[in-house]
Amino acid sequence: MPETQLADVTPVLLENIKDILLETEGVEKEQARVAKEHTELSRALGRDTANMLALSSAMAGDSGSQTAMAKERTALTREQTRLSTKSTELATIRTDLGRERTSLAGQRTDLAVQRTEMARQRSSLADGRTRMARERTGLAGKRTDLADRRTTLSHERTDLARGRNHLAEARNELSTQRTTLADHRTLRAVTRTRLSLQRTELARGRTNLALIRTGLAFLTIGLSLFRLFGLSAWTTFDAGLVVLSVWMVAVGFRGFRQANLRERQLEDLLARDRGFTDLLGVELTPPGTA
């Protein structure tokens, strides 16, 4: 039986028990009163018996008294019968009270059995709750283990990310170094190209100087032949040598001037060339700025 039904039935049972106890108390009082009356009647019966003995001794002289005493005896018998009937009724009431008490005891026993069954159910529920708590604790432990594993994996992932960042930084540094090396290589290639051009212009200057020297040599030979032979058949040859020498000197001077101008321009470019200054380890001053 659920606890709510027990809570509803218990006040009714207590009220019934209270009524039965009140009735039992009334019956016991009535029984005490009847016993008291029976005692008084017994005493009266004793007195009457004594009187009857007295009357018996005087029966011979008073028949009227015997008739009256017979009536009194009949009344006493009737009263005793009535008292016996009341005693029987009291016994019946006591028996009913015993039955009701037995019924109440049975109900109390049923309530105790139900309470025991409820206690067993409560114990089984407590066991189930304890078992669920243990399972929950086990699941919590597993969840904690999974959290620890996840934390470990997170740390490992963080370490891998840090390593990847370090590798990326190293790769960036290598890329920067490679870019710097490429820039240096480009600058040096440009420097090498400009040095090659400067070498070429210097070679052209030397060629033009050689042409000027050759022209001056031809001019010297022509003038020497003219001074040696004067106006003669060699004069045309001398004039040709002089003209050739003048042309060679003019061409050589013009070429040397252009080569010298280009060589100065290249020197200006080399003075501003970072690759060339890095290669020499000194800072050059462009021509015309000193």
Image: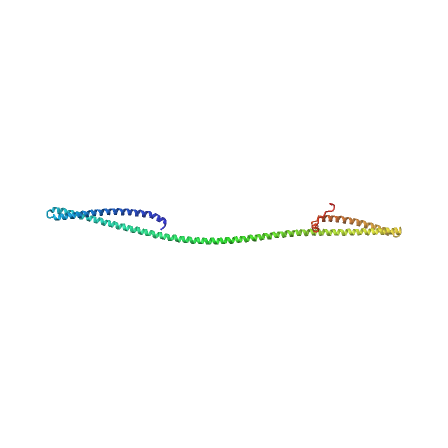
State the quadrant of the C terminus: top right
Q: Nearer the viewer, residue 290 or 220?
A: 290
Left or right of 211 in this view: 140 = left
Q: Nearer the viewer, residue 55 or 148?
A: 55
The colour scheme used to paint the residues is: rainbow
Left or right of 205 in this view: 110 = left
Question: Residue 115, how many percent across, how many down?
Answer: 35, 51
Left or right of 272 in this view: 224 = right
Left or right of 117 in this view: 287 = right
Give the number of marks. Answer: 0
| Farthest-out residue, top | 289
Question: Residue 233, how many percent across, how many down?
Answer: 88, 52
Question: Residue 7, how many percent across, how many down?
Answer: 35, 48
Q: Nearer the viewer, residue 245 or 126?
A: 126
Q: Nearer the viewer, residue 24 or 204?
A: 24
Question: Residue 10, how many percent across, how many down?
Answer: 33, 48
